[in-house]
Image (cartoon, grey):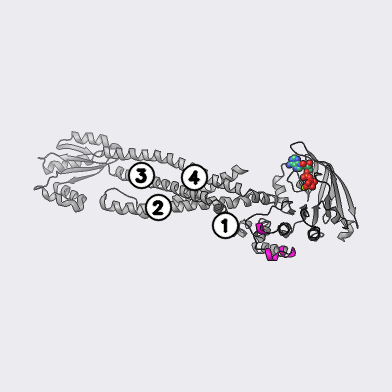
Amino acid sequence: MKNTLYNAPYFMKEAGRVLWQNRLSSVFSFLSTGLILFILAVIVACWSVGNLLIKTMQDEAEISAYLDRDIGTEQVLELIETIKGMEGVRDVQLVDREAAYGRMKEILGDEAGVLELFEENPFEAFIEVRISLGELEKITERLESLKGINHVRNNREVLERVQSITIGLKRLGYLIVTAVSISTLVIVSHMIRQGIYNNRVQVGALRLLGAPESFIGFPFVLAGLLLTLAGGLLASFVIVFLVNRTYSAMAGSLPFIPLPARNQLVSGLLLFVSSVSILLGVLGSMFGLRSTK
Amino acid sequence: MIKAKGVSLRYPDGTLALKGIDLEIDTGELVYITGPSGSGKTSLLKLLMGIEYPTSGSLKVMGQSIAKGQEGNIRRLRKRIGPVFQEFRLIQGRTALENVMMGMRFLGIPCRQAKENAKSALTRLGLEHKALSMVENLSWGEAQRVAIARAVARKPRLIMADEPTGNLDHDNALIILDLLTSFRDTNTTVIITTHATHLIERQENATFIRMNGGNISVERRGKAYEEYLV
Ligand SMILES: Nc1ncnc2c1ncn2[C@@H]1O[C@H](COP(=O)(O)OP(=O)(O)OP(=O)(O)O)[C@@H](O)[C@H]1O
Ligand SMILES: [Mg+2]
């Protein structure tokens, strides 16, 4: 420990020398670890967006029950009470024609002008039923059988599609993460092996002078760490840039896709990239050191 | 300091380099090892540094036995040895000063102290003006003195130099020998192998180990070194 402190500048210099000796290979490793970590970060970002999407959508499992045209107010209130009493129903709300019109206007935003083309409000009144996802099928069936309800629509298909995409994404993600980690480890450990080979005279001399292996190996581990850290930094820059771009783009055109808070996502990604790059750097160099003994 | 009992060394290819050597060397001795080429001088030094292990017999250096299974302890033992290798083993791309400091970096000496020791060792060897030169730009004799500086700056208890006079002319060989022997004191043992028997004949107060075909004979000359110590 004491030695490490005394020698901090020396270790840094030696690590720099190892990287410089092999500059071509260093640059290559830097770029490829950067790319790899970037891919990793993109996957993680997709995961977190997908997870949030599923979570929000699960909360938003809902059924729209469209009413018969000639139904009276009394009957509607009765229906609402009945539905409220069903198991798994969380919230029931009547959306009358005016409200339906208003909602669409809000969704369309700047494009709301098209609604003016209708002479009459084209929307129908419906009862919006928020439920827990598990009960979707059962409640849909029961609603269909109720008197006064014309037809029923639920968002099961959308939910299922999102869910299966997310699951697929996750599987693909695991695969890529594994492949990516292994290739980073290989790249880094190869770098370190090369470095030790190039410095074998020095390593041999230090051993004969009684230097402990930890002292001999430290600059190489440091070099590997610096390499992956630099790669991580590169990946971080690119991913932050990309996230910012995506968020500004999404804010305009796709307002109803729920995105995680930008700061939270960015800081989470940065934390992830830096810890993975540290881990891979240290592990890779350790493997490299191991394989030369 | 050194205790060898019936030590033999057989290399993997079957060469028997040392044949049952008995030897005791005490702290503070000045030891010259001479003998024809291939007689086992370097082999003996390798054993003393734990680079090779005796294939039979027992060997202890500063209380540490040189044997399989002692690798960690032998590594620690080497911290107290100042080796000057026949081929120097200086580290290219570094300055003379950095090379000398390299031998001290893992001894728990604060950097500033190590630098001071390194500078004063270089100065003692007449190389203060070359401290910041890259070692690959030094002349043979200068490089050799850097190697010696690296060995002595760490204040070892045992200095071992293998053929430090090889490739040197008479005058420079004498200078190097004088320098090396000047580090001998009551705490520091100095062992030197050399072909240049004519240079060391004048030496008094020294131990001479003559090697031949893996056998040794020992002569202690001049005042018994116990007296020298007093
Ligand atoms: N690694 C090795 N493997 C096999 N044989 C070896 C090895 N090293 C040395 N020898 C042999 O051991 C014998 C002693 O060698 P050593 O190097 O100790 O001699 P030396 O006295 O130092 O010679 P020189 O004066 O030429 O340096 C020689 O016969 C040599 O060929
Ligand atoms: Mg020799």
Q: Residue tagged by mark 2?
A: A238
Residue B52 vs residue B35: left or right? Answer: left
Q: Can residue B83 be seen in the rendering of this structure? A: yes
Badge 2: chain ID = A
Give the distance between the C-alpha atoms of the residues marked 2 and 4, in whole angstroms: 18 Å
Using residue B7 as the reference point, say whether residue A128 is left or right of it.
Answer: left
Whole-percent x, y for residue A62 in the image:
25, 42
Q: Which residue lies under the disc numbered 1?
A: A12
Placement of the C terminus of chain B among the 4 image quadrants: bottom right
Crowding around mark 4 (Cα neighbors within 10 Å: few <14, some 14 to 19, many 20+) is many
Q: Residue at x 49, y 52 (%)?
A: A229
Going by the numbered disc 1, the residue's amino acid type is Met
Residue B198 vs residue B221, the one in the foreground: B198
Q: Chain of mark 4?
A: A
Q: Which residue is mark 4?
A: A184
Task: Determine which quarter of the picture holds residue A13.
Answer: bottom right
Secondary element at tag 1? helix
- Sort mark 2 into few (<14), some (14-19) or many (20+) by Cα contacts within 10 Å: some
Please name whichever residue, A166 or B171, is drawn nearer the observer in this view of the structure. Answer: B171
